[in-house]
Image (tube, grey):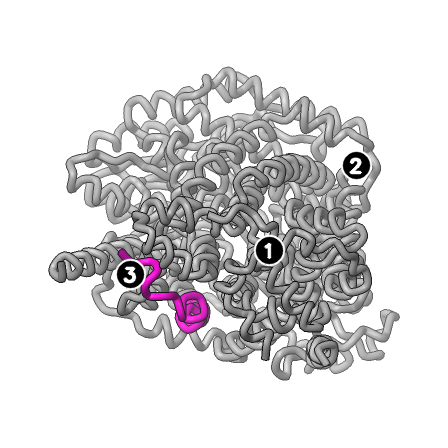
């Protein structure tokens, strides 16, 4: 069938159909049919809790009693009276600043390393993905503390080089670093997405570049990166959204300590909601975070037109 | 020339082995610790003096009423539905957003993204109250249903990005042949995003396996517990049954590992062998 | 043609959802179903299904289930719909249930939480249950909140200290004695320092509000949080003295350094201060000392908290059974609780799974069969009861202050704040909360 023959991506790069083919026709009915699963689910199950949480942010709500309206008190207190708010925001920003680039970098490098047909590659990939599978279990907490304590394995290895280690997890200056490391160590999911993206790059592109005498580095910068850019963009946006909401590792490994040095925003929010019986205040915190993250995502989207390359837009061909 | 290639291969393997060991060292610790007695856990050694295999056998037993077999069965069945729902519906929704032009598309897509930015801790209680009103307590429905409504914003957005990477010329060519919007979806787009769909399946499996908070809220009877919930029963107010906890958590990770191992063929099969080497 | 393929997909999804609904309420396998409660009256003859929730380890769960079976045998019209889970999860699920007004009929309550739950109106007043055969008036009076009894105690608890008997004897250090005073406690620490190797410490540093409260109360200056949270009372002189001594101890290495202290995790085999061999003593309750004994079998012994002129530590029940205001079968629930605490058959079934049974007779019956860790708990209780002072938990709405107290004192421990600044901060926030609560 003709459609089958069209499946070869190679055909696409050779076709130079003109811009008039850019989809401008409206497909209202079809569009809504396709997105109906999400739309229905959203209207039925997600919208109301979200609206409810917005309402709750203007109340005092212990969960044990009905909410009482307090107007903008929560927001006022957050911005004027709350040191923990400032601390947790600072801690979270630092976390995001370091873990997102680190994770992206390692995931991409490792994905490329694993994207070969070397014997036993299946095993290597599984081994390297493993840390991301153990998620937020108590085992991970015990493990990480075991590695980075004063007498932990990491210091043991350092001693081989004659370096005296400190209690990395229990020192307020380094504890956040161990969490950043933990987050980076669990880069598997980001890596897998890069792998899937790498697979989609047509091999013919590399072939023709080889024929032209391009070096490995050139191929990376002129083929791999641009073709990967939609996926890179995805990983960046979601990396930021995800790390702002990072909760599990702070909760299980350090409980926000010592002295708030790892008091991630999501942990702070959680404690307000479930430990201090202030769900209203926590809801306000949540909406403030949403605004911050939405702003950053919007900026990401705006800037993306300068570096993200979608084939569908008939963009620049090498 | 050949020798250089061989050396290159050897160093690649060496690098991979070292790196893998680095990733896996904690697992080695984990296995060793799972075979220790609680008192032995305070010692710095990796391996126990005598392995306590009963951590696995007794740990599996769990209680006079249920074994972990029951919990694995519960969880695997739930996962089957989760993955099915996510894979089916996320592709549909993503295609709609990525390829079709309809009124309010931009606004709806923004709402989609925004739902990811609100921390779940503050919607979990209103959501619970909602499900409570619908009389859906002590059942898997609150856990599985969201996957049938698009599978989650994360996957929809992921597939949108993949679909946008498919040249529109393919769509147009098919259109010329008389294919409808649905046809393009089924014949052109769907086959081309297979690696991404496999990703959706794997991640849905792995992430919903661990989602203990929702499972804890919605599953009341112990007979319905998932593996994750049952594991938490080994953690008491003062005492943690470390041996059994570590043993069973290790087993609990295995299905995800096995799934990943077999599914990864979908990512990399058919990579042109000429393209990336050299 | 293509449309039918899409339709096929849609149909498949729909079929899947329908199939799910069918098996959803039945559970993945043949799970237990919770039949809806249909009788709303308190008549014990009409069939009643009590929804009951508790937390704990598996042994406790099995004991609890058996106890329910015994009750149903004696009262065939009452059956149970039990739910149980781990400690952590329990306290997250309860607020959610409260918010949706679906708290169970009978629930397990704890001294650390009952203040919040009671004062916010989620628990029934149980003062009318007659427990005179088993519990004395005075104990019950001490448990009342706002003049009402919100939980029936089911076990005895006390706060004391555990110490590493084996290691102390080996080092030739005199063991702590019952009713030792605070001065003796500090002297014990000073003297033991010389006899212990480097990296091992006689006592640990402290950053929690309750440990300081024992000090303040024992010297007659009263509780920190008074009048159900409406009054704040932090004695400056005692505060400065207490933490001044600990600061001196930090300098002289009589207490471990700050980062070692923050790494401690009680009852964790690697990170427990005593089990890891780093500290010779630590606080323990009747409930928690058993776990410690398991980590260090045969090595530890117990003593009460250091005493002052007014006494030391506390001895009071902290585990309760309560009835929620959402309960559908309040009378049946109360009847069950009364039976649970007073009936011998009940006590024999659940034994010491909740701690030392409040009914002395049940305890003496069980005594011969007790394991060493349980005997140690009883010893702690007996040691502590003479000089025990009233149990003084944080009032409702003070959990945040409690957390901040620890963080502030941690800053002092790490040398980032002076004791006086810490005092001022803690007092300021404490007074603010007290003011807010009196205004209500």
The location of residue A94, given as percent across then percent down, is 48, 32
Q: Chain of mark 1?
A: B
Magenta-span inclusion, residue C4: no
How many angstroms separate mark 1 from mark 2 (CA)? 40 Å
Q: Quadrant of the N terminus of chain A?
A: bottom right
Front label number (3 vs 1): 1
Segment tinted magenta in the rendering? B252-278
Between A16 and B156, the one lying in front of the other is A16
Q: Which mark is residue B28?
A: 3
> Is label 2 on the same chain as label 3?
no
- Disc 3, SS: helix
Dot 3: within a 10 Å radius of its alpha carbon, few (fewer than 14), some, or many (20 or more) residues? Answer: few
- Disc 2, SS: loop
Q: Quadrant of residue C62?
A: bottom right
What residue lies at 71% left-to-right and 75% top-to-bottom?
C6
What residue lies at 75% left-to-right and 57% top-to-bottom?
A42
What residue lies at 21% left-to-right and 36% top-to-bottom?
C196
Of all residues shown, which one is farthest toward the right?
C41
How many angstroms separate mark 2 from mark 3 (CA)? 50 Å
Residue of label 2: A58
Residue of label 1: B164
């Amino acid at each position: 069938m003709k459609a089958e023959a069209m499946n070869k991506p190679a055909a696409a790069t050779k076709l130079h159909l003109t811009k008039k083919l850019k989809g401008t026709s409206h497909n209202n009915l079809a569009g809504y049919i396709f997105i109906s699963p999400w739309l229905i689910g959203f209207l039925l199950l997600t919208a109301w809790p979200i609206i409810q949480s917005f309402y709750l942010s203007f109340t005092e709500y212990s969960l044990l009693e009905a909410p009482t309206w307090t107007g903008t008190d929560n927001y006022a207190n957050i911005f004027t009276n709350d040191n923990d708010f400032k601390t947790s925001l600072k801690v979270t920003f630092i976390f995001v600043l370091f873990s997102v680039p680190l994770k992206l970098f390692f995931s991409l490098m490792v994905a490329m390393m694993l994207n070969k047909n070397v014997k036993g590659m299946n095993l290597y990939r599984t081994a390297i993905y493993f840390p991301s599978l153990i998620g937020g279990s108590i085992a991970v907490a015990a493990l990480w503390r075991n590695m980075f304590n004063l007498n932990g394995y990491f210091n043991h290895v350092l001693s081989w080089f004659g370096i005296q280690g400190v209690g990395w997890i229990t020192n307020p200056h380094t504890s956040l670093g161990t969490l950043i490391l933990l987050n980076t160590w669990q880069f598997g999911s980001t890596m897998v997405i890069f792998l899937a993206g790498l697979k989609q790059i047509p091999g013919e592109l590399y072939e023709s570049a080889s024929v032209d005498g391009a070096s490995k580095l050139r191929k990376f910068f002129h083929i791999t990166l641009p073709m990967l850019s939609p996926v890179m963009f995805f990983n960046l946006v979601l990396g930021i959204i995800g790390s702002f909401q990072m909760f599990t590792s702070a909760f299980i490994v350090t409980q926000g300590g010592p002295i708030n040095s790892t008091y991630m925003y999501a942990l702070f929010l959680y404690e307000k909601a479930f430990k201090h019986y202030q769900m209203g205040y926590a809801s306000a915190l949540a909406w403030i975070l949403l605004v911050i993250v939405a702003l950053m995502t919007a900026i990401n989207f705006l800037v993306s037109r300068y570096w993200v390359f979608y084939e569908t837009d008939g963009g620049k061909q090498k | 020339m050949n020798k250089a290639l061989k050396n290159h291969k050897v160093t690649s393997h060496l690098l991979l082995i070292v790196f893998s060991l680095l990733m896996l060292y904690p697992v080695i610790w984990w296995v060793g610790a799972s075979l220790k007695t609680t008192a032995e856990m305070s010692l710095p050694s990796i391996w126990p003096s005598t392995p306590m295999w009963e951590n696995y056998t007794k740990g599996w037993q769990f209680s006079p009423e249920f074994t972990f077999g029951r919990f694995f069965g519960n969880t695997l069945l739930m996962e089957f539905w989760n993955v099915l729902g996510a894979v089916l519906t996320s592709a549909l929704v993503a295609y709609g957003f990525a390829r079709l032009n309809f009124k309010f598309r931009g606004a709806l897509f923004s709402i989609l993204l925004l739902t990811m930015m609100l921390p779940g801790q503050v919607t979990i209680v209103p959501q619970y109250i909602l499900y409570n009103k619908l009389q859906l307590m002590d059942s898997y429905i609150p856990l599985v249903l969201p996957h049938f409504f698009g599978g989650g914003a994360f996957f929809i957005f992921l597939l949108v990005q993949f679909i946008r990477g498919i040249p529109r010329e393919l769509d147009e060519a098919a259109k010329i042949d008389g294919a409808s919007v649905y046809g393009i979806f089924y014949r052109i787009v769907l086959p081309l995003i297979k690696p991404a769909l496999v990703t959706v399946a794997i991640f849905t499996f792995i992430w919903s396996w661990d989602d203990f908070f929702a499972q804890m809220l919605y599953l009341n009877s112990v007979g319905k517990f998932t593996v994750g919930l049952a594991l938490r029963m080994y953690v008491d107010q003062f005492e943690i049954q470390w041996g059994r906890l570590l043993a069973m958590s290790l087993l609990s990770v295995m299905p995800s590992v096995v799934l990943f191992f077999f599914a990864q063929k979908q990512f990399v099969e058919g990579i042109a062998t000429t393209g990336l080497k050299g | 043609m293509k449309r039918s393929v899409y339709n096929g997909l849609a149909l498949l999804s729909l079929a899947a959802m329908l199939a799910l609904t069918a098996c959803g309420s039945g559970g993945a396998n043949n799970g237990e179903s919770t039949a809806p409660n249909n009788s709303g009256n308190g008549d014990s003859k009409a069939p009643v299904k009590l929804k009951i929730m508790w937390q704990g380890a598996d042994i406790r769960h099995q004991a609890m289930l058996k106890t329910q079976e015994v009750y149903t045998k004696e009262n065939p019209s009452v059956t149970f719909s039990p739910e149980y889970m781990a400690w952590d999860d329990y306290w997250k699920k309860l607020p959610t249930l409260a918010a949706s007004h679906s708290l169970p009929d009978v629930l397990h309550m704890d001294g650390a939480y009952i203040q919040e739950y009671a004062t916010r109106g989620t628990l029934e007043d149980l003062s009318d249950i007659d427990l005179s055969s088993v519990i004395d008036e005075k104990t019950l009076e001490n448990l009342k909140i706002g003049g009402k009894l919100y939980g029936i105690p089911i076990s005895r608890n006390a706060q004391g200290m555990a110490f590493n008997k084996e290691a102390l004897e080996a080092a030739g250090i005199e063991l702590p004695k019952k009713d030792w005073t605070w001065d003796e406690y500090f002297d014990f620490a000073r003297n033991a320092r010389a006899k212990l190797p480097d990296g091992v410490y006689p006592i640990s540093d402290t950053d929690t509000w309750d440990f300081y409260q024992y000090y303040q109360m024992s010297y007659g200056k009263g509780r920190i949080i008074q009048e159900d949270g409406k009054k704040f009372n932090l004695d400056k002189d005692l505060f400065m003295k207490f933490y001044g001594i600990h600061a001196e101890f930090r300098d002289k290495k009589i207490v471990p350094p700050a980062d070692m202290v923050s790494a401690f995790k009680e009852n964790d085999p690697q990170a427990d201060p005593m089990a890891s061999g780093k500290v010779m003593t630590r606080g323990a309750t009747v409930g928690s000392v058993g776990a410690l004994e398991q980590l260090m079998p045969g090595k530890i012994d117990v003593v009460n908290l250091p005493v002052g002129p007014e006494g030391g530590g506390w001895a009071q029940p902290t585990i309760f059974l309560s009835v929620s205001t959402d309960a559908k079968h309040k009378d049946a629930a109360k009847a069950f609780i009364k039976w649970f605490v007073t009936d011998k058959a009940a006590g024999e079934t659940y034994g010491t799974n909740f701690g030392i049974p409040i009914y002395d007779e049940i305890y003496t019956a069980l005594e011969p069969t007790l394991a060493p860790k349980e005997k140690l708990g009883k010893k702690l209780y007996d040691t502590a009861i003479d000089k025990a002072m009233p149990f003084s938990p944080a009032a409702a709405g003070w959990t945040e202050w409690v957390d901040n107290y620890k963080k502030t004192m941690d800053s002092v421990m790490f040398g980032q704040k002076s004791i006086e600044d810490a005092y001022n901060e803690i007092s300021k926030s404490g007074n603010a909360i007290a003011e807010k609560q009196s205004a209500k």
